[in-house]
Image (spheres, grey):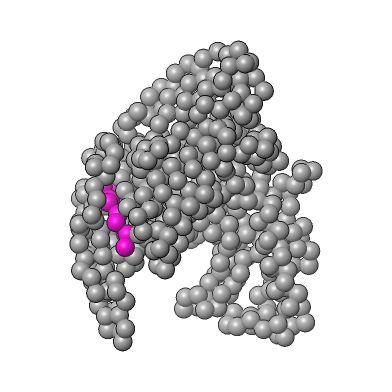
Amino acid sequence: MAALAFVLALGAGPAAAAEPRTPAAPTDPTASAALDVGAPTGWATAGAGTTGGAGAAPDSVHVVSSRAELAEALANDGDPAAPKVILVRGAIFGNEADDGRLLEAGDYAPGWDLERYMACFGPEGTEWSDSRHPWCGEQRRLRTTGSNAQKRQIQLTVPSNTTLLGLGRDARLLGVNLSINTGRNIIVRNLELEAPVDHFPSWDPWDGEQGAWNARFDALSVITGANIWIDHCTFSDGRFPNGEAPTGFHGEPVERHDGLLDMEDGTDLVTVSYSRFTDHSKTMLVGSGDGRGDRDRGRLRITFHHNLFADSAQRSPRVRFGQVHVYNNYFTGSTDDPDYPMHYGIGVGLESMVVSEYNAFDYTGPGASAELALANLNGHQFLDRGSWFRDRPTDLNAVARRQFEVRAAEARATPEPPEWALREFTTDVGWAPADVYDYRPQRDPRAVRATVLALAGAGRVAVPWPW
């Protein structure tokens, strides 16, 4: 492949984006490819920093337009960890077979039937029984084998030292479970990522008061990754909103999506910037569980800035353990949205150390108030500065304290109260973003709203094409 040489500049500061510079002419084929996609702000700048595939050799610059081509580019001719740049052109479908067919549930597990699977729990979904119907044992096996087959098809793992960049305004990964597993120094930019539809969701009758569906696949999952920059991306349920899902137990739709962006198991030094998270229920986890402190303490250092969370019902994000900085993000949604009714914005979980600054919340609908801006989920440390609810200053520290004290009082009334419930709430989170990196927050809700709506999301990074 001929060498690629161009320069891209975007967004030197939070208030405005710089105009892209004119790309350089193609260089001599023997020259090294050069790609400058700007630089992140926030935790991704710490440690070794985040440069992605900078310095990639000419034969490690790939333009892809199918799932097979993307998988081949990630393998990078047998040297996956070498610096590489992968440019996505148009739509890539995770369920696309090598012959171009789009695979469905029947291709992964012939004979699978959601209605028959549900019937094996009884009419209210209370308890599975292999003997409830003649087909129950088979449906249980098909759900497992089908799910594993779909995972092998749609999951694509991004190795270290990679820049994954969308070309133009229509670069999309549709139904791909993009995965970063122990990868380091990775940039994902200017891409639309549509959450995969899990064709084989599982029903757990003991999850919550009435039971719950659990889907398997995220749009992007990060496990033990480090130095990652996710910028100018759009995440959503896309063509498959919850309202169009099959009806499950208790008249509720079957949940076929997992997270949009989950970061777990000691993931560290990440910046998520100028991205859109829309039309989804359980949007984003930081830390996988209260019992994973051995993996997560001292890690999960993540910055979120200038992102849009629109009709993101909850987990925007939901944090455990990490030192997480959430500033200049814009949150919208409604408590009576038919598909994604608002539950809460930021989740303050166990041992989380969240610094929230100058975020704008515009939640509407019956009962909408600043209480929806966050949910205290056993976190005794939280600090907010300068955030607004419907353009008015709001005291989110008081909201977090009040919610914590209610939960702690309930937990202390049990025979063996958990350790977190014996703590006192504090706004001392033990760290300050300004001690780690430089940033310039906007301090007016109108400016935050205007900047995020104008600049966040895929299709806003000018990548020259063709060469």
Q: Considering the image in quadrants, where does the C terminus appear?
A: top right
Residue 465 in view here? no
Report the predominant secondary structure element of the magenta stretch: strand
| Magenta stretch encompasses residue 131 | no
- Report the residue at 43% width, 55% height from top: 266
Q: In x, y percent, where is residue 125?
A: 59, 79
Of 436 and 100, nearer the camera is 436
Left or right side of 92 for 402: left
Left or right side of 8 for 397: left
Of 364 and 463, nearer the camera is 463
Of 122 and 432, nearer the camera is 432
- Report the residue at 40% width, 31% height from top: 39
Residue 198 in view here? yes
- Report the residue at 45% width, 33% height from top: 51
Q: How many marks?
A: 0
- Report the residue at 48% width, 21% height from top: 7
Residue range (magenta): 351-363
Q: Considering the image in quadrants, where does the N terminus appear?
A: top right
Left or right side of 183 for 367: left
- Is 331 located above or below residue 318 in the figure? above
Left or right side of 424 for 287: right
Q: In x, y percent, where is residue 272?
A: 41, 43
Q: In x, y percent, where is residue 185?
A: 48, 39
Q: In x, y percent, where is residue 372?
A: 32, 60
